[in-house]
Image: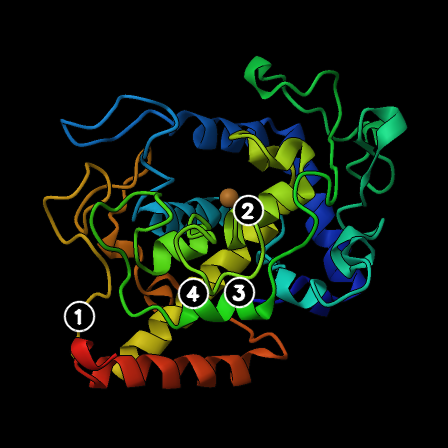
């Protein structure tokens, strides 16, 4: 069983091995394929009456397959990293822990021996330190004209688009969702469910309990980092994988809460059928071969997550919230 650890828990040698393996993948030309996969899955997958628009739901975003698609994506990348160095697993980045820092830009993930730090305004927001800095020459970023990020090199703009990272309270709202997803399985602020909450589309417009303006949770992290993390080519920044690894962990945590609150063998996924193409339980996660159902259980997939220090208490709260809601009839809620 592979164990994925917090980036904050990695030893110096583990950080160095992870960075070296990423650079090796880049040199092999393999890394840029990931960017391509993520970018090209933007082909809309929609029901017949819905608009054929890239900003509408597609096979990997703005719909139920968001979590399974990215779980499979991370597995592919982790397998490639492990073919370079079999001691590696993907680290996760718990941004709720960094949200508590006076300056989240000083967190371990952004140190020079890990992913390097913020970009510099006077240098077109290019990253300045560490192995991924433009000046280090290891990390050419392929140009995608529609990204509107002129010039080569990896870019970050911490806090320029949105000022703060999501907090533990924001995450609790997601963990206490009872349904995985609900019709119309899309990204309006009013679509109830865990997936839409964690992806980050349930804003203050849709739920007055949301504390900050603008995008939430997963989306908010992309926008807080900014630069190459903002457009659909976001895997250009290796932070993408640590961010999505935490998103995947949160999903696994939610699945564990569901499993012991409703021990009925249900998949805790929706839709089972008749939903948008690519998003049903038995649909294939394109361009790969596994189906949504085949990626639901991380133990079957051969990995687990080492808990983050503050998480046991948070999960206990979420379990209690879910239990209360499942036991009481809806009209009593
Ligand atoms: Cu993302």
Where residue 135 appears, as percent x and y from the top left, is 87, 28
Give me the disc on residue 198.
none
Which structural element holds mark 1? Answer: loop
Pointers 1 and 4 in contact (C-beta within 8 Å): no
Comes first in the chain, label 2 or label 1? 2
- Identified at 67% across, 29% down, the residue is 27
Answer yes or no: is residue 304 visible: no
Residue annotated with mark 2: 214
Q: Is mark 2 within 8 Å of ligand 1?
A: no
Q: Relative to the observer, which residue lies in front, 139 or 70? A: 70
Residue annotated with mark 3: 170
From the viewer's perspective, is the residue at label 1 or at label 4 nearer? 4
Q: Residues within 10 Å of mark 1 (few under 14, many from 20)?
A: few
Which structural element holds mark 3? Answer: helix
| C-alpha distance separating marks 1 and 4 | 19 Å
Comes first in the chain, label 3 or label 2? 3
Residue annotated with mark 4: 174
Where residue 137 appears, as percent x and y from the top left, is 82, 27
Number of marks drawn: 4
Pointers 2 and 1 in contact (C-beta within 8 Å): no
Where residue 73 appears, as percent x and y from the top left, is 43, 44
Q: Residues within 10 Å of mark 3 (few under 14, many from 20)?
A: many
Pointers 3 and 4 in contact (C-beta within 8 Å): yes
From the viewer's perspective, is the residue at label 2 or at label 1 nearer? 2
Residue annotated with mark 1: 266
Q: Where is 305 relative to 218, above or below?
A: below
Q: Relative to the observer, which residue lies in front, 151 or 131? A: 151
Q: Relative to the observer, which residue lies in front, 68 or 262? A: 262
- Identified at 61% across, 41% down, the residue is 223
């Amino acid at each position: 069983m592979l164990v994925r650890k917090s980036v904050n828990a990695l030893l110096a040698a583990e950080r160095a091995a992870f960075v070296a393996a990423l650079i090796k993948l880049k040199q092999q030309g393999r890394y840029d394929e990931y960017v391509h996969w993520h970018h090209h899955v933007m082909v809309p997958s929609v029901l017949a009456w819905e608009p054929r628009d890239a900003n509408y739901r597609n096979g990997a975003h703005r719909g139920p397959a968001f979590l399974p698609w990215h779980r499979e994506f991370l597995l592919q990348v982790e397998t490639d990293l492990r073919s370079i160095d079999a001691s590696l697993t993907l680290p996760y980045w718990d941004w709720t822990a960094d949200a508590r820092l006076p300056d989240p830009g000083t967190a371990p993930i952004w140190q020079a021996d890990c992913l390097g730090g913020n970009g510099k305004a006077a240098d077109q927001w290019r990253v300045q330190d560490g192995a991924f800095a433009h000046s280090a020459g290891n990390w050419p970023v392929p140009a995608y004209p529609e990204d509107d990020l002129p010039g080569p090199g990896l870019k970050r703009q911490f806090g320029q688009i949105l000022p703060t990272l999501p907090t533990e309270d924001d995450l609790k709202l997601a963990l206490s969702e009872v349904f995985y997803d609900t019709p119309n399985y899309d990204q309006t602020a009013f679509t109830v469910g865990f997936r839409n909450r964690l992806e980050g589309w349930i804003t203050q417009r849709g739920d007055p309990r949301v504390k900050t303006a603008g995008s939430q949770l997963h989306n908010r992290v992309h926008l807080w980092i900014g630069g190459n993390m903002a457009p659909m080519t976001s895997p250009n920044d290796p932070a993408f994988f640590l961010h999505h690894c935490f998103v995947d962990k949160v999903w696994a945590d939610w699945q564990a809460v569901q499993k012991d609150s409703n021990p009925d063998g249900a998949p805790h996924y929706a839709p089972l059928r008749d939903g948008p193409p690519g998003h049903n339980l038995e649909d294939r996660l394109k361009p790969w071969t596994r189906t949504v159902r085949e990626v639901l259980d991380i133990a079957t997939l051969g990995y687990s997550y080492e808990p983050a220090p503050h998480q046991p208490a948070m999960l206990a709260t979420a379990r209690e919230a879910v239990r209360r809601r499942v036991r009481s009839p809806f009209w009593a809620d």
